[in-house]
Amino acid sequence: SYYGINNTSQERINNCAMKLSSLALAVSLVANIKTSTAFANSNINLHPYAAGTRTTTRIFQLDEAASSSEITTPNVDEIPTIEFPPPLTKVENYQRAAKFWSSAIPIVLSYYSKSAELQVKQAFTGVSLTEAEEQIIWNEQHRKGALELADIISSLKGFYVKTAQIIASRQDLFPAEYTDALSDFTDNVDPLPVSLIKAVVVKELLNRGEKFEDVFSEFDDTPVGAASVAQVHRAVLTEKYGGKEVAVKVQRPSIESKLMGDIANLKALAKTFRESDALPLDYYTVFCELESQLQDEFDFVAEAVAMDRIHACVTRDANGLPCESPIVLPRPVPGLVSKRVLVMDYLKGVPLSRAAEEMLKRGIDPDSPEAQIFGRRLLRALTDVFGRCILETGFFHADPHPGNNGLHS
């Protein structure tokens, strides 16, 4: 808390999210426990933006007005004729791998060549650079490498976007030039057309004889946010389904094969440089763990269960008695959950990554006393929630980068 409060408001927010991400990732890697549940806060309210999915299984909750006879499969004849992107072929995976390797290796080799250049220059001239002079040279090297990496990720997308999100949130492991250049990948990443999103929803959620308008009275064309695996749209349910405002999280079609192929490429690259002293840690082990955990992000049914489990953790004390939660979490809507679509409560707000920008829009100086108070409340709330989840239950949100958490207005 001390470290965060003594920086500007946006730095406090980013540092808070970064340190929580570091703690969550560290515990996750050790304990092999992870949830991809979305997360939100009230007054200091946090809220989610996107994740992933796989095949079709719908969760139903029956009430007095419903019976098992009403649960039927969707009417295939009523699904719009939208062409879904097919899974990547082996040739396409090889092409992506070739493009990745041909672009990433020169970035890595440029560091070795720059180091050799400095050593040769020192040997011939006998003059050693000062620490400040070396820092200037390496900062420029980082700047060039970061821009090249951002271009690669923008071109390839897929799991490389998730890699960018990890790098952007880990200021303790990566140079500032990289974290800054990749910060734009934390939300609103290459959104899909709404026609395709609606087609996925129809295929996943509609019962036989239902139309899209039978479930949603409103559905925004512009997504609230888009990420590597899924994107989220604001919508309003019909009275038949409760009539409330919701967030609809939808998987990108055929994203699973692309992401799993991408992470295999990253594993291969990390393994090549596993023994290098230039890397701060063994990224091969990290990518192996991410590969095994990534499958969870394709299952929204599991995510809905995780959301309820996290909610139970933060709304009950150690004795199992109800208590007030310092955050607000969206809850899944019973009957509107599948492995590719997750309908949940909608919370208005902005991601933490745009908190300082939002303050300025509202006429609040990010360095003002009000912002300082906000920073303290945010740190206190997040420390309380993550402390209880990690230390009391061992079940927690393990991907809390600034794009996955938001400030609820």
Image (cartoon, rainbow, N blue to C red):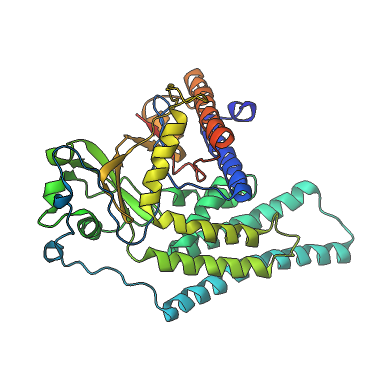
Identify the residue shown where x is 44% and y is 79%: 90
Total marks drawn? 0
**Percent coordinates x, y for residue 350 in the rendering:** 38, 37
Quick one: 58 or 67, which is closer to the camera? 67
**Rendered residue at 45%/55% (across/down):** 296
> What is the quadrant of residue 1 in the picture?
top right
Whether residue 244 can be seen here? yes
Q: Position of residue 384 (x, y in %)?
A: 53, 27
Q: Looking at the rendering, which quadrant does residue 354 occupy?
A: top left
In the figure, 402 relative to 150: above or below? above
Residue sticking out furthest to the left: 209
Q: Quadrant of residue 52?
A: bottom left
Horizontal arrangement in the rendering, residue 292 relative to residue 346 (left or right) = right
Instruction: Assign the C terminus to one quadrant of the image.
Output: top left
Location of residue 102 in the rendering, given as x and y in whole percent from the top left corner: 56, 74
The structure residue drawn at horizontal position 40% and vertical position 57%, both measured from the top left corner, is 298
